[in-house]
Amino acid sequence: MTTRTGMTTRALPYGPVTASPTWITRWTGLGFSALAGIAAGLIVLFLAIILGNIAVHGSGVLTWEFLTTAPREGMTEGGIFPAIFGTVALVILMVVALVPFGVGAAIYLHEYAPQRWWMTRLIRLSVTNLAGVPSIVFGLFGLGFFIQFVGRQIDRGLGLDVVWGRPSLLWASLTLALLNLPVVVVTTEEALRAVSRQMREASLALGATRWQTVRHVLLPQALPGILTGTILSVARGAGEVAPIMFTGAAYFLPYLPKSPTDQFMELGYHVYVLATQSPDIDATRPLLYGTVAVLLLITFLLNLAAVLLRGRLRARISARG
């Protein structure tokens, strides 16, 4: 820095003060970096061991017959096609029920509800606490509310026998949608919060209504974040067993469900059955590993489709910007 006195320019005797890190600071940083690297390496190692174990023991049974036929002979022979179909149908119905409701709730909380209102704070607190409820509690709730209350009321109102008031694919998917609701609500709110305030104010200044601003400005910008929540929900929903045990999954069902009111087989529950209920463990062990491999593959493919869609949306938004 310099100062000018009359016609003379001289440098000030001081400059920017920089503190050089001591050896304690440097070694502390290196220690934490080493611990973080070791933790990451252990995670990758354990994941590789698990996937390798599944691949080694399950690859021998991954045949076309295993993927396209129904189980037989006490589930010690045959394939798992009914479980594959039931898992995919369950996840699709869950997403169809979950995304509109979760995104709508997040839009209301972020854009329409008074932020200082006690009810808004209570709803946010309830959504946060809902994420920590054990999944088996959701299964009991689905059994009591969807099946015993809603389903039985529909049967009485339509004068039907027990059609809606029994475990089914519909009630299992709605139970899983309720289980994953906090994930979608939180991620959607964060995505809406990430949209710049200038874009919102510019839309309103041009005469757009609040709903037009939400529909044409906020939602297109927030779609990648919404898809992130959907990806997490798909991964969790495809592997959950406790909620669907009470609401729709069948122990053994060698045919496909014909309507949403039918029961179904599911890969996660099928793994549980093979591991705990089979009369011949040695005969079902290869089928168990093969079923786990197929479950992981289906989850990966569903997540990959969502990730690719999210990438295309981000590229389109960047091109527009």
Image (tube, rainbow, N blue to C red):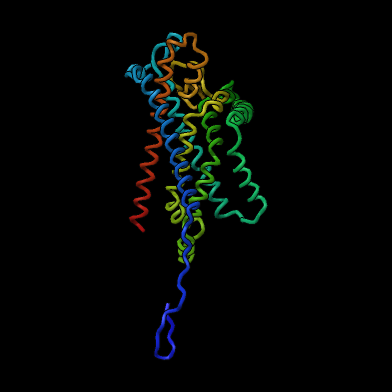
Q: Quadrant of the N terminus?
A: bottom left
Q: Position of residue 299 (x, y in %)?
A: 42, 31
Q: Position of residue 59 (x, y in %)?
A: 34, 20
Of the pair 160 and 185, the residue shown nearer to us: 185
Query: Would residue 239 be found to the left or right of residue 160 on screen?
Result: left
| Residue that lies at the very extreme toward the front in this rendered image | 23
Query: Would residue 305 be found to the left or right of residue 235 on screen?
Result: left
At a point 43% along the width and 48% down the height, the residue shown is 223
Count of number-bearing discs: 0
Residue 83 in sight from this viewpoint: yes
Q: Position of residue 3 (x, y in %)?
A: 44, 83
Residue 250 in the image: above or below residue 117: above
Residue 12 in the image: above or below residue 74: below
Of the pair 43 and 206, the residue shown nearer to us: 43
Of the pair 291 and 259, the residue shown nearer to us: 291
At a point 53% along the width and 45% down the height, the residue shown is 185
Q: Position of residue 140 (x, y in %)?
A: 62, 27
Query: Would residue 128 be found to the left or right of residue 31 on screen?
Result: right
Residue 151 in sight from this viewpoint: no
